[in-house]
Amino acid sequence: MEKHLQGGKAFGYLKSQQEEKLNSINEIFLSDPKYADEEDFNSKLGKFKNKYMEFDHNDQGDLDIMGLKRMLEKLGVAKTHLELKKMISEVVGNTTQETFCYTDFLNMMLGKRNAILRLILMFEEKGKDQEPKETGPPRRKTFSDLP
């Protein structure tokens, strides 16, 4: 029996299917002895999965140049088309391919090579830890606050 979903339900179903696929890939990485010594590995994979899902909106499985462009713009690091192509070629090790899959993304994030995208994502994660979050309404401004 095929499900006939519309709107938000269809999107939720698509995202749950996508999460299942990415979880199965994470399980492969968790069982890999190469990463046995990796500290807090399960939560790292969870963060990487969430970041990837955030930009793979249609569950096509690969992030293309536009997905990467949206990711970097959201991080405040806009790049040109040529820079984006170079980033993707660093991730996949191929200059003709214009997409990268979740496995490539994990290999980049866990690998020893310092790919540009990896550095940007790591920098964003560190920035989140350092920014103090203010609660409540913003404080009242005074004349001494003006430039």
Image (cartoon, helix red, strand yellow):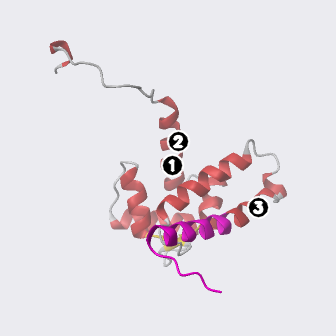
User: What segment is highlighted magenta in the picture?
Assistant: 1-22
Rounded to the nearest angstrom, the CA distance separating label 3 from label 1 is 22 Å
On the picture, is 103 further left or further right than 81?
right
Q: Which mark is residue 121?
A: 1
| Residue type highlighted by circle 1 | Leu
The secondary structure that most of the magenta stretch takes on is helix
Q: Is 18 included in the stretch rendered in magenta?
A: yes
Question: What is the quadrant of residue 40 in the picture?
Answer: top right
Lower position in the chain sequence, tag 3 or tag 2: 3
Residue where numbered disc 3 is placed: 27
How crowded pointer 1 is (Cα within 10 Å; few <14, some 14-19, many 20+) is rated as some
Question: What is the quadrant of residue 144 in the picture?
Answer: top left
Q: Position of residue 128 (x, y in %)?
A: 49, 36
Residue 112 can be seen, yes or no? no
Q: Nearer the viewer, residue 18 or 71?
A: 18
| Residue type highlighted by circle 3 | Glu
**Figure disc tally:** 3
Looking at the image, which residue is at 62% across and 70% down?
A: 17
Q: Is 76 included in the stretch rendered in magenta?
A: no
Q: Position of residue 99 (x, y in %)?
A: 50, 73
Q: Which mark is residue 125?
A: 2
Lower position in the chain sequence, tag 3 or tag 1: 3
Report if the CB atoms under discs 2 and 1 are less than 8 Å apart. Answer: yes
What SS does tag 2 mark?
Answer: helix
Looking at the image, which residue is at 66% across and 69% down?
A: 21
Report if the CB atoms under discs 3 and 2 are less than 8 Å apart. Answer: no
Which of the two discs, 3 and 2, sits closer to the camera?
3
